[in-house]
Image: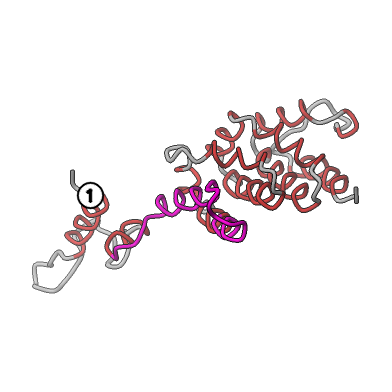
Amino acid sequence: MADPGLNKLLNWAVRNSAQSTNGEDAPAEGAAPAGRGLDADALRALMGGPSDADRMKDAMTAIQSPQVDLDNKLIAFDNFEQLVEGIDNANNMENLALWVPLVEQLDNTVSELRCMAAWCISTAVQNNIQAQGRALALGIVSKLVTLGLNDEQVATRKKAITALSSEVRNYQPGMDELLKHLPKEHQPSSETVDATDMDAVDVLINKLREEVAKPR
């Protein structure tokens, strides 16, 4: 089967090599200007490098591998987090079956890895309703509440609350789920919080941040 990345490269090359009727180089009508329209994965295919999807899978393989030491797992997590800053990569996590192993890292016995998992989740779901929905379906809210309120390390607690903040903003199902799992002492004065009301969301999240920052 032909490599879809190479097909994209060929199509791009054809579009950008069209000649005008007077013999001067010119893009075909409706084509992107030369040097544009070639996405990062296609460019990497041309240069022989791995795609973002490959890099994400390789990072998760390293994170899960018992043969990889902690320092390199953290490097792999840092690379993964940078990759899922792109909304296309974040949305591709489901197709690549990366959501479940990422969520599983929230239960890792190593605090640094729990922290990095929460950070990656926060990045992936921020302003991304598709990722927010997938995370919600995997029970992420209750896990993050438990981590945020009970983890032994303050850095991990803070990242968990940051991830909750990203999950619930402008996403009412996530906010409703958060209110279900918050202990009574952390519940807001009103029964509901509008996920699109940033002031109200800030009040709720900031109270949690103040709580998790307290020394244990």
Residue bearing mark 1? 3
Q: Is residue 1 left or right of residue 53?
A: left
x and y, in percent, of residue 141 in the image:
69, 34
Residue 169 covered by magenta stretch: no
Q: Nearer the viewer, residue 86 or 63?
A: 63
Above-or-below relation of 81 to 103: below
Give the image location of residue 27, x and y in percent: 20, 64
In front: 113, or 36? 113
Stretch in magenta: 47-76
Give the overall secondary structure of the magenta segment: helix
Picture quadrant of residue 211: top right
Residue 15 x %, y %: 19, 59
Location of the N terminus by quadrant is top left
Q: What residue is at 45 percent from the left and 52 percent from the top? A: 58
Count neighbours of disc 1 (C-alpha within 10 A) and say few if under 14, some if 14 to 19, many if 20 or more. Answer: few
Which image quadrant for residue 193?
A: top right
Whether residue 139 sits left or right of residue 60 in the image: it is right
Q: Residue at left 23%, top 55%?
A: 6
Q: Amino acid at mark 1?
A: Asp
Residue 156 location in percent, x, y? 74, 49
Residue farthest to the front, as pictured: 67
